[in-house]
Amino acid sequence: MRFVFRPFPLTEVHPYAEVAAKSAEFSDAAGIFCKMHVFRNQVILSVPTIMLIAEKLRLSETMMRHVLETRQFRCKVRNDFMGGVRSGVNGTPTLFHQWCPS
């Protein structure tokens, strides 16, 4: 079994959904996606909260701000979102089972 995490930011439901998705992608690029915990912190999610989490994970504040203020990771987040829409995703989290014959 394999788990694949893809962003599906519901921006109409949560104002920081896209920011959270981009920060999660940045943490994934640093090899610490599972430690970012943006989904777990969604009730208190804000840019300061994301920056605090990043600081605790020793991610560069300068790089995180760059990620949040630019289009870096925007295409990946958007492509993953559209892939979710095509697959019938309408909420998060969503799990799919795919049969892979051996």
Image (cartoon, grey):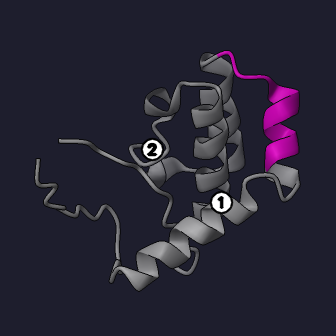
- Tell me how far mark 2 sits from mark 1, CA to CA: 22 Å
Pointer 1 local density, CA inside 10 Å: few below 14, some 14–19, many at least 20: some
- Residue 76 figure quarter: bottom right
x and y percent of residue 22 in the render?
66, 51
Pointers 2 and 1 in contact (C-beta within 8 Å):
no
Expressed as whole percent of the image width and height from the top left, the position of residue 70 reads: 88, 55
Towards the viewer: 81 or 50: 81
- Give the residue pinned by disc 1: 76
In the image: residue 41, left or right of residue 58: left
Question: At label 1, which amino acid type do we have?
Answer: Lys
- Vertical placement of residue 68 versus 84, above or below: above
State the mark number for residue 11: none
Q: Is residue 65 magenta?
A: yes
Q: Which residue is mark 2?
A: 41
How far across and how far down the image is residue 29, in percent? 64, 33
Local packing at callout 2 (Cα closer than 10 Å; few below 14, some 14-19, many 20+) is: some
SS of the residue at dot 2?
A: loop
At 60% across and 19% down in the image, what residue appears?
A: 57
Quick check: can you spot residue 96? yes
Residue closest to the eye, 98 or 40: 98
Question: Taking 68 as reference, is 55 left or right?
Answer: left
Total labels drawn: 2
Start-end of magenta stretch: 58-67
Three-letter code, disc 2:
Asn
